[in-house]
Amino acid sequence: MKRRFANGGCGEVELTRKRKRKVCGLWSLPDDVALTCLAKLSRVDLAALAMASKIHRPLVVSPELWNLRWRMGCVEPCLYVFLHIFPDPWPRWFIFHPAKRRLKRIFSKLYPAPESGSCFVANSWGFFVIGGLKNGKPTSEVTFFDCFQHRVYRFPPMMMARCGASASQIDDKIYVFGGVADSESDSSNYVEVFDLRTLTWELLSVSTPPKMPLKIQRSAVVKEKKEICAVDEKGQSFFFSPEKRMFVATGKTDSKARHRNHWCSMGSFLFCHDSRHRRILWCLPRDLDWKEVKGLQELRGYDICKLCTNRAGKVFIFWKVPQTLELWSAPISLRQRETPEGLELSGDIDWYRALLQHSCLGVNLLHAGFAYT
């Protein structure tokens, strides 16, 4: 699969060799063979090589190497976290170092992000940041953080300025719901869709059913059905079908919807955090009958601030310790079994520790997710 958003220069990397002395090691190989050998290394090893050898650094950071890793299937999941550390005026991206189990700040030229209210969509190799508040006003800006190059690119803005919207990707399109001021909101501009192939936005004409969601509080993609499951501010649940361009109400209402925070999906399951009882819950999208993930009583004392999942079947949980201004995390391995009462999910904590210790006025975790680089 080719990367579509390699806006940075992709010129050929010139491999310089000193011909006057005997060549050995990596430089003794043909260029394409050397690239193939490097492509099989882990990202951590490549980073270590770039730090240890100035000669090899241009090759390690070259677009050719990362494109080759993608084509060879040598990419690996990397956890990225978007943090606003006060008094810094702008949020910043961090990458998780798996060996040290720490967050490392990404030092690169980043486009100033909105202060809050943005929605995030994970692409295979990066993250879209859509809308939000900038200088106290809703913005239509769209940026993309490229996890290969650790650079931020500007994309065509939305047709409407939006803050607090909900966004999801299905196939090659991103669907953005709501986030428009009440005085400007109607069915004609409620849904906006971005085509990743043509890089264009359009307002989606939605067939209006008997009920239409109000402000969407939570949403997640049900990949098997290619639908978007959502709950509005009154707890009414809906499914949005891009093919039919229609919201379909399930007829179910969750009276505790405001406590079901940080939705994320994995396979056929949805997960969330119950802020009232401080539990991790799961459900099947069609049922929305939330049940507790067993075996995680140890986490009940923490104020969870974000959940995310990876393709390896783990749920990553993040929480802050206010007294120390530390950001902690724990990956959870899940197990499922059939019981007389039905399906049951339980979790085992792989490890937990502080990912970030910072002397600051406060930390706000805006997003956490995995990209493959």
Image (cartoon, grey):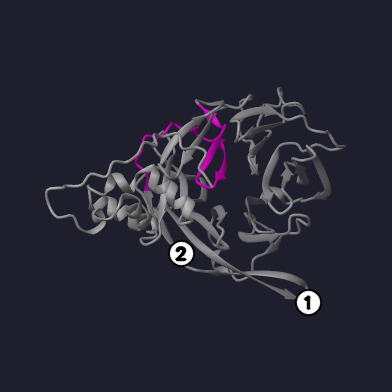
Q: Is residue 180 left or right of residue 356?
A: right
Label count reads 2
Q: Are marks 2 and 1 in contact (CB under 8 Å)?
A: no
Locate residue 323, reporting x and y percent. Answer: 42, 53
For residue 180, which quarter of the picture? top right
The residue at the point 56 percent across, 54 percent down is: 308
Q: Earlier in the sequence, mark 2 or mark 1?
A: 1
Q: Residue furthest bottom?
A: 340
Q: According to the image, label 2 marks what residue?
A: 352
The residue at the point 44 percent across, 31 percent down is: 112
SS type, badge 2: loop
Is residue 118 covered in magenta? yes
Q: Is residue 120 at all visible to an observer of this figure?
A: yes
Q: Which residues are magenta?
A: 105-134
Q: Is residue 322 at all visible to an observer of this figure?
A: no
SS type, badge 1: loop
Q: Label 2 neighbourhood size at 10 Å, few (<14), some (14-19), many (20+)?
A: some
Q: Say which amino acid is labelled 1.
A: Pro
Locate residue 64, reporting x and y percent. Answer: 39, 44
Q: Is residue 280 left or right of residue 92?
A: right
Q: Residue furthest right?
A: 210
Q: According to the image, label 1 marks what residue?
A: 340
The CA span between labels 2 and 1 is 33 Å
Q: Nearer the viewer, residue 56 or 138?
A: 56
The residue at the point 35 percent across, 51 percent down is: 32
For residue 164, which quarter of the picture? top right
Q: Is residue 167 left or right of residue 85?
A: right
The residue at the point 43 percent across, 50 percent down is: 68
Is residue 223 covered in magenta? no
Q: Is residue 12 above or below residue 97?
A: above
Q: Label 1 neighbourhood size at 10 Å, few (<14), some (14-19), many (20+)?
A: few
